[in-house]
Amino acid sequence: MADQPIPALEVRNITKRFPGVIANQDVNLKLYPGEILGLLGENGAGKTTLMNIIYGLYHPTEGEILVRGQPVVMHSPKDAIALGIGMVHQHFQLVPVMTVAENVMLGSEAVRNGFLDVGAVAQRIHELSSRYNLDVDPYALVEDLPVGVRQRVEIVKTLYRQAEILILDEPTAVLTPQEIQGLFQIMNLLKEQGKSIIFITHKLKEVLQVADRIAVLRQGKVVGEADPRTATQASLAAMMVGREVILTVDKKPAQPGPVILEIQGLTARNDLGEPALREVSLTVRAGEILGVAGVQGNGQTELVEVLTGLRPALGGRITVQGKDMTNASPRQVTEEGPSCHVPEDRHAYGMVGSYSVAHNLVLNTYYRPPFAQGITVNEPAIVEHASRLVKEYDVRTPSVLTPASSLSGGNQQKMVVAREFSRPVKLLIAAQPTRGIDVGSIEFIHNQIVAKRDEDVAVLLVSYELDEIMALSDRIAVMYKGQIIDVLPREEATREKLGLLMAGVHPDEAASSA
Amino acid sequence: MSRKRVWKTSSIVSMVLAVGLVVMAILVNTTSLSQQTWLRVLFGVSALNFALRATVPLVLGALSGILCERSGIINIGIEGMMLAGAFAGFVVKVATNSWPLGMSLMAGVLAAVLIGGVMGLLHATLSIRYRMDQIISGTIIIILAAGFTAYLFDRDAVAEGKFVAMPIPGLSKIPVLGEVLFNNPPLTYLALILVVVLHVALFHTRWGLRTRACGEHPRAADTVGINVNRYRYMNTTLGGMMAGLAGGFLVLEAVGQFQEGMTAGRGFISLAAMIFGNWMPFGALGASALFGYTQALQNELLLAGVVNVPRHFISMLPYVVTIVAVSGFVGRVRPPAAEGKVYETESSA
């Protein structure tokens, strides 16, 4: 190891304790110049805490950080920036009402005669933009930009500050498959120009594709390193979770029964008043999972909202078990379907963060006995119900009285699933049921969905993750620009074929070229 | 997008109105149109002069609000800061009655600004250091100022002299316009200059960029090494000074004496002007001018006695206009996204 180059960044024996929790314990990492280090770990494994320490937002309880071989102490991000460390945060740190140039210069402003020199900053952004193929317009307002471009603005922000070490925190979580490939090209370009990158993710395939070296974090500790040339998804998942994980879902062939959900010629508009659903027709039978594949923003959100009574249908018909449910209220959908809904955005539609776990678990049944007694609620019954569900659905919470917002994402999602799945239903509508949660919870929720199917429930599954659709579905519908452009049996649906359909290629052409 | 369009159209409309007002004022005051009572009430030089006098404290109050809220601190305590400033100005003016008038007035203005700043600092400390709800903290400022000034006020004290008009050579000779705009006491000029200064500072300097970032997305500011709470302390203190200056204007330039509760809701109307003006200095000037003009109108209508409705209805005019203007624009203006929210980091907590 004597001829190893000096690491651009090294953390030695870092430990970080929060009151009652150890977020990082004895972490050692090295990042060499011109390499991409994949930092893999489940949600809550301590990846973000570690990066916040490296970026000066948190102070380590113990241990030290070395930049280019020199020990450093950082009091705030200002110190990290001065040392050439740049971070692209998971939640973008951009001011929406300001322009790209204003956002880029914020904190490191170019000033001439006391006034901001926007022209000079714009010039610099153009240079960086063309050098690293980022395609960013300095005068655009950030709020007008799509997510993928905002991320590139964040990258420009770090480069403008002459960062040599870039930390990308879960950068692919918000991107479409095409945008992810674009980001990887940019990362490789940055690497070729000598920048060092820490790429944080929990997606196994991505880290294998782009990283030069992989470090795995579990429960705050580095549990091992891996070489992407020899590691497999299964071996990485096992390291990440600490046990063997079954990445494919084990399920029996479907036994479809009678039609439960029938959608005919459904049309609806999105929030901006533009057509979002154009004559959508679908059927889902009892005992089958119909997966709806497609790139985000092609009408999937609106479809689910119309089906669950959250958005008006402008035309067409929805029937559930033969009953007309077009424009029914959410409660009618819940009660008369009877159906349940795992919403796409659990924070906005799935739970009340400041309520306890117990109260969240009765959000759809609180108004009936035994939870309601006249006009009052029966707390003991609610708590008892919650204690049972928490055990049954493996929701890890200190107590059922803990506020839901203090649970990890995976446990919040399991809580939502517990609430929705614990009623006898005939129709299950699940949108992005495993968005942003850890591998262990994904496995659990997938098994629950398959179990529902085997109880003769009709399942409509919407997901932007092609892997999830392919793992669970019995039939796959592809949505493109508000239309269902094809419905395929699972056996005929190859990744290539689905990819072409998702890009809007006509089914006949897709069949001949795939 | 539609919000931007609303702002574009409303600024065009207000410019057209302003030009129309100037044209009418020149016509009415230089031709025989001045024989028409109604036109004189609406566009006479005295109406316009009164409007400007009523506008000054409102626009200073609105600038105070902009300074605080652009950095993320809600300031409903402008009324209290103004009152405290007015009282301090009065006390120092009375104490220095024996000094030359100019010196004594300057001392009064300094005291008003200083005490306003102290009130601002208090508001900032309560909201940031002690994480108090900013609406409650603002209310405390109002009650504190009202109570203290009423308790400490010596009814026998008399301030001798106030600021007088300083015509600007040349410009003040322009017919009508010169009389209205360029023949005013110094604090009026200062208020108008401050509008321009604050606009340039907010949108074209480092301080302004950082201030706006703290009000919109403090975490983003923090991640690029900006000390969010330091900016909030600084701006809230500056905002208090601005409100103090408004109080100083009332005592040392407009009235010449202090009266209990003399701000009479001006702090609240300037809050409305800040909102109506979309947290922009020039917007605040336009809104303050509208409210100031309705006050002038109320005054002129009562003097001229041209309408046959009880005077109480006429007295309501400025308040009705304020309510209509603000409620009509709710949802079309956009406050700084992070205002009213405490910003905490591990390092600052």
Image: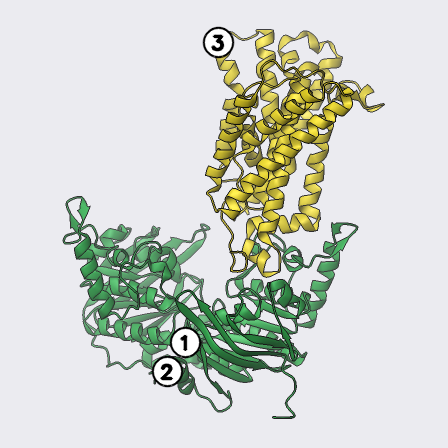
Dividing the picture into quarters, in which one does residue B262 lie?
A: top right
Residue beneath label 3, please? B310
Which residue of the protein is positioned furthest toward the bottom in this rendering? A2
* Amino acid type, residue under disc 2 in the picture: Gly
* Amino acid type, residue under disc 1 in the picture: Gln
Q: Distance from label 2 to label 1 (Cα)?
A: 10 Å
In the rendered picture of this protein, how many numbered marks are placed on residues? 3
Residue beneath label 1, please? A219
- Residue visible at 64% across and 17% down in the picture: B257
Q: Using residue A32 as the reference point, say whether residue A422 is left or right of it.
A: left
Q: Residues within 10 Å of mark 1 (few under 14, many from 20)?
A: many
Label whose residue precedes the other's in the sequence (2 or 1) = 1
Tell me the number on the disc at residue A242.
2
Chain B in the picture: what colour? Answer: yellow
Q: What x and y, as percent, mark residue A508? A: 42, 75
In this rendering, does residue B221 appear at all?
yes
Q: What x and y, as percent, mark residue B42? A: 63, 16
**Secondary element type, mark 2:** loop
Chain A in the picture: what colour? Answer: green
